[in-house]
Image: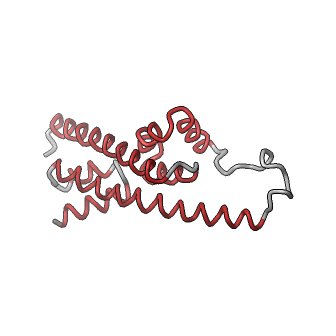
Amino acid sequence: MLKFAWAALAGFALGTPAVPFGLSISLAPPLTLVAVLLGAAGCLLSAVFAAGWLRTRWLAWRARRRPVTTGPSPEKRRNRLDGATGRRASRVVNRYGVVGFGIIGPALFGTWGSAMLGTALGLPRWPLIRWLMAGVTLWCTVMLLASEALIDAFGLM
């Protein structure tokens, strides 16, 4: 039971890369997958809800501080998502929508990063959580199969 808890905690902290950790502590592959997915679900829920709350508070503060009628025009303001990661995330969302971002996001940005970026981009909360969880499940399964193949190939356990 303690190994399962450690794998779930690693899934919360790391996301998909926690699968090899679960296998390295001699947890059975199906239990490793379930533990990491439970941890990743906790990560996604906490990140999306916390980032959504912060985004709402920040937008309200910004609206009070800087009325729309004064200051530079909105197109001249610097957007915080103009960096390389923000541009890449925006491209993925514009091209593939929430479904594509949810599937591709965990591989490109990690579990925490994709949850925070999806929320920052203003994607709807529950579809984002649902598709990010589908993406995490896909990538955890791929990581589990690859890790098992490497363990068998090199005879590590």
Q: Is residue 41 left or right of residue 56?
A: left
Q: Nearer the viewer, residue 129 or 21?
A: 129
- Residue name at image x 18 percent, y 37 percent: 154
- Residue name at image x 75 percent, y 67 percent: 64
Tag count:
0
Tell me where residue 142 sits by quadrant.
top left
Q: Is residue 44 above or below residue 102?
A: below
Position in image of residue 29 (x %, y %): 17, 48
Q: Is residue 10 left or right of residue 71?
A: left
Position in image of residue 97 (x %, y %): 51, 37
- Residue name at image x 65 percent, y 64 percent: 58
Position in image of residue 52 (x %, y %): 53, 60
Q: Nearer the viewer, residue 18 or 75?
A: 75
- Residue name at image x 29 percent, y 41 percent: 143
Tell me the quarter of the image containing the N terminus.
Answer: bottom left
Position in image of residue 149 (x %, y %): 20, 36
Tell me where residue 42 sits by quadrant.
bottom left
* Residue at the limit of the structure toward the top, as seen here: 95
Q: Nearer the viewer, residue 21 or 11?
A: 11
Q: Is residue 100 above or below residue 62?
A: above
